[in-house]
Image (spheres, rainbow, N blue to C red):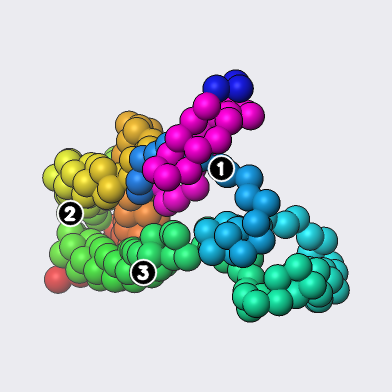
Amino acid sequence: MGKQFSCGKRKGTIIGVMKNAHFRSLHLEIKPLVFFMMEDVLEATQYGVVLIKINGEKTKEALAKIQSVWESLNPISPFEYHFLDQKYDSLYRKEQQIGTILNSFTLFAVIISCLGLFGLASFLTEQRTIESGIRKVLGASESGIAVLLSKQFIKWVLIANIFARPTAYFIMNKWLQSFAYRINIGVWMFVLSAVLAMGIALITVSYQAFKAARANPIDSLRYE
């Protein structure tokens, strides 16, 4: 504090030091920033930016007042303004668009996968109708038969998760590398997604599995 300081052709006295403030996108690292107080209005309009906090419910009145003050102090330069939230929105609009697209494709993929699982479950349970009837006659419970029929689907979903997790980690980590300041990818994300995938698969095939398990064994044995 109080020391002389030079930045390029500008010289001055240090009157305050503040903590690091991020004034650019989070994709970039924090760089040194110097604030100058300018008494010359013309010089300030060439380089400076004025940040003003206004009442959001009286935006039009505030802008009209600011414009009148601006024109009285600096009639040479035109009055131009931007809202800070719009500036921040433009910094991360690309990420928001990518997120919307990925969410849409994810939902579409889940629906297609559920339809495929439901059709496959219907086909395979129909093929094992006689087997289900024999097991039920021999004393197997409905829940046991349903678990037996569902287990073969869960096995493949589990295998798919094992192969998908490394790929997902690589893609997510690669995307996070574009940020100078980023979070770490936690294991809970993959555990939660695996549990959700298993749950969706179970819900999809359980209807057909329980339908086959609850069928009359006499009808099942007469199937062919």
Give the amino acid at mark 1.
Phe
Question: Residue drawn 34% across and 33% down?
Answer: 184
Give the amino acid at mark 3.
Ile
Measure the C-alpha gap from mark 1 to mark 3. Answer: 40 Å
User: Label 1: how many residues lie within 10 Å, few (<14), some (14-19) or many (20+)?
Assistant: few
Disc nearer the start of the sequence (2/1): 1
User: Label 3: how many residues lie within 10 Å, few (<14), some (14-19) or many (20+)?
Assistant: few
Q: Give how far across and how far down residue 105 sits, in percent.
A: 32, 69
- 62 w.r.t. 211: above or below: below
Disc nearer the start of the sequence (1/3): 1
Give the label on residue 188, or none. none
Read off the residue under disc 3. Answer: 101
Q: Give how far across and how far down residue 85 sits, in percent.
A: 60, 61
| Image quadrant occupied by the N terminus | top right
Q: Is residue 40 visible?
A: yes
Q: Which residues are magenta?
A: 4-26
User: Label 2: how many residues lie within 10 Å, few (<14), some (14-19) or many (20+)?
Assistant: some
Read off the residue under disc 1. Answer: 35
Q: Is residue 175 left or right of residue 199?
A: left
Disc 1 is placed on an element classified as: loop
